Amino acid sequence: MEGSDVSDSAIPDVLKHALARSVSKNGDFFLAQSELASLAGRLGDAEVVSLYEFIRDTSMRLEREWRPEFMAAFPLQQGVLPAPLI
């Protein structure tokens, strides 16, 4: 898969939780900017979708708050992201 240097299982849980926590607290990635930047351009489609769904399902925030920032970090995967739930 193109752009797939890191597999989903290689994304440490602590990193996924840091991203979700930032979104949970602020509705954005302000508290986890470096974590998001460390993954940008390194994940394949399936990994980006999995990360997106993890953040969506655990952050308890509306996708419209953080989705644009997520899409900006992963521009090549914009077309494979699921439609917002709300």
Image (spheres, rainbow, N blue to C red):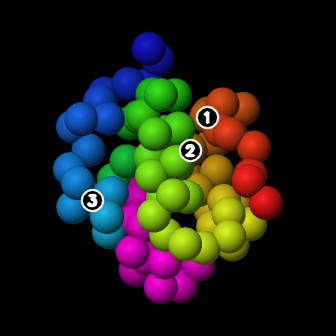
Q: Secondary structure at mark 3?
A: helix
Q: Which residue bears the numbered disc 1?
A: 77
Query: Where the N terminus falls, by quadrant?
Result: top left
> Do the residues under discs 1 and 2 have CB atoms within 8 angstroms?
yes
Which label lies toward us, 3 or 2?
Answer: 3
In the picture, the disc for residue 74 is 2
Query: Where the C terminus falls, by quadrant?
Result: bottom right
Give the residues in magenta: 19-37
Q: Which residue bears the numbered disc 3?
A: 15
Considering only order in the chain, which callout, 2 or 3, is on the residue closer to the N terminus? Answer: 3
46 or 75, which is in the foreground?
46
Tell whether 74 sits left or right of 15: right
Is residue 82 placed above or below 5 in the rendered structure? below
Residue 16: x %, y % from top left: 33, 57
Q: Secondary structure at mark 2?
A: loop
Type of the residue with mark 1: Gln
